[in-house]
Image: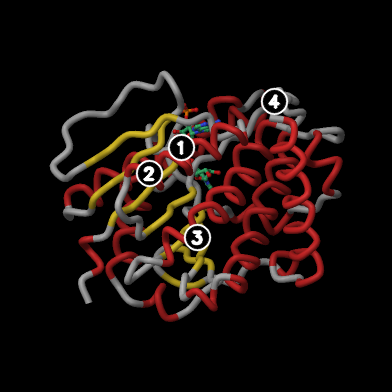
């Protein structure tokens, strides 16, 4: 099996884990579709075919347009890597009335996987990978309050958004099994990126103190490459991978009732947003 000739779409590819992964996969000859924020500088110096797509992932309509463009422009897509994320320190609400982190991580992950499923299904070795986090274990939420940012707290909201993403991994792992598309989570561990740039006070100080002990984004990229090149991810679905090994998801990320309720709530939310366009 040659897993190394696949086309991989990476969100959040302009910096940190996304960019390091793109560089590593490029060196191995993968074809890449890199999703950047509109107006972001285009990283240069690629060896393999790379195409850039610009999208504000916090805007569901932009995500729908991205999906349409990807389907129109690219003959095939094998791997979808939903990696973009943000942890705002203040309550920020998008024009659609969604909390910024929820829109960026939860809604875009749902729309991208849902919208690109049929495209991925035509690949010989399809795969969906979502960047998670250890902190999903501390997540807890009520859907309306989380989506609207009503009870916003910089840490609790991020933990809950990560929990939702892990519940989506479980949801799509189960619904896409019949189409032969494995869906997995990647837990990077604390990584030396610019992710903490919005942090304030004590948490900002801690992120500076911890920085020398964090993993390098290149280490996480190496994990991703290894996972893509082995058959491990193709034979199972719904696993969470940390440093190349499966690590159990939190019980609330595997709770069937909560998972299906989230999927239903997101479906209703996205349908309502689409009708407003
Ligand atoms: N670093 C860690 O310790 C750590 C630990 C656990 C999990 N993670 C997860 O790892 C993932 C990658 O983060 P990172 O550490 O590599 O940090 P990062 O360098 O800040 O990467 C996040 C990427 O997402 C992009 N992004 C955010 N909002 C966007 C939007 N609305 N539209 C388009 N792109 C958007 C950012 O673009 P801009 O730069 O333009 O904003 C950036 O390129 C995230 O999902 C994060 O939750 C990180």
Q: Is mark 1 within 8 Å of ligand 1?
A: no
| Alpha carbons under labels 4 and 1: distance apart | 31 Å
Q: Are marks 4 and 3 in contact (CB under 8 Å)?
A: no
Among numbered discs 3 and 1, the one appearing first in the sequence: 3
Q: Is residue 158 left or right of residue 186?
A: right
Q: Residue 215 appears at what percent x and percent y?
A: 40, 48
**Where is the C terminus found, in terms of image quarters?**
top right
| Alpha carbons under labels 4 and 3: distance apart | 26 Å
**Where is the N terminus found, in terms of image quarters?**
bottom left
Q: Which residue is mark 4?
A: 94
Q: Which residue is mark 3?
A: 117
Residue name at image x 49 percent, y 49 percent: 82
Q: Is residue 29 left or right of residue 133?
A: left
Badge 3 local density, few (<14 within 10 Å), some, or many (20+)?
Answer: many
| Alpha carbons under labels 3 and 1: distance apart | 37 Å
Q: Which residue is mark 2?
A: 72
Q: Which residue is mark 1?
A: 211
Among numbered discs 4 and 2, the one appearing first in the sequence: 2
Q: Secondary structure at mark 4?
A: loop
Badge 1 local density, few (<14 within 10 Å), some, or many (20+)?
Answer: some
Badge 4 local density, few (<14 within 10 Å), some, or many (20+)?
Answer: some
């Amino acid at each position: 099996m040659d897993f190394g000739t696949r086309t991989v779409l990476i969100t959040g590819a302009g910096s940190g884990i996304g960019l390091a992964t793109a560089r590593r996969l490029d060196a191995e000859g993968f074809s890449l579709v890199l999703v950047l924020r509109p107006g972001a500088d285009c990283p240069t110096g690629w060896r393999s075919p790379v195409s850039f797509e610009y999208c504000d992932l916090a805007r569901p309509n932009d995500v729908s347009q991205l999906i349409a463009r990807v389907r129109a422009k690219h003959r095939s897509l094998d791997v979808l890597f939903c990696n973009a994320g943000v942890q705002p320190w203040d309550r920020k609400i998008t024009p659609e009335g969604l909390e910024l982190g929820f829109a960026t991580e939860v809604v875009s992950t749902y729309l991208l996987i849902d919208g690109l499923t049929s495209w991925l299904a035509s690949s010989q070795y399809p795969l969906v990978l979502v960047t998670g986090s250890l902190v999903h274990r501390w997540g807890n939420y009520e859907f309306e309050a989380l989506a609207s940012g009503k009870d916003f707290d910089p840490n609790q909201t991020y933990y809950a958004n990560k929990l939702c993403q892990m519940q989506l991994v479980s949801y799509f792992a189960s619904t896409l099994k019949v189409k032969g598309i494995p869906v997995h989570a990647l837990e990077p561990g604390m990584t030396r990126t610019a992710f903490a740039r919005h942090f304030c006070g004590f948490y900002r100080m801690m992120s500076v103190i911890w920085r020398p002990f964090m993993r390098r984004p290149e280490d996480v990229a190496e994990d991703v490459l290894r996972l893509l090149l082995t058959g491990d991810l193709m034979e199972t679905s719904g696993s969470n991978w940390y440093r190349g090994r499966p690590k159990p998801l939190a019980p609330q990320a595997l709770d069937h009732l909560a998972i299906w309720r989230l999927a239903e709530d997101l479906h209703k939310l996205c349908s309502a947003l689409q009708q407003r366009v």
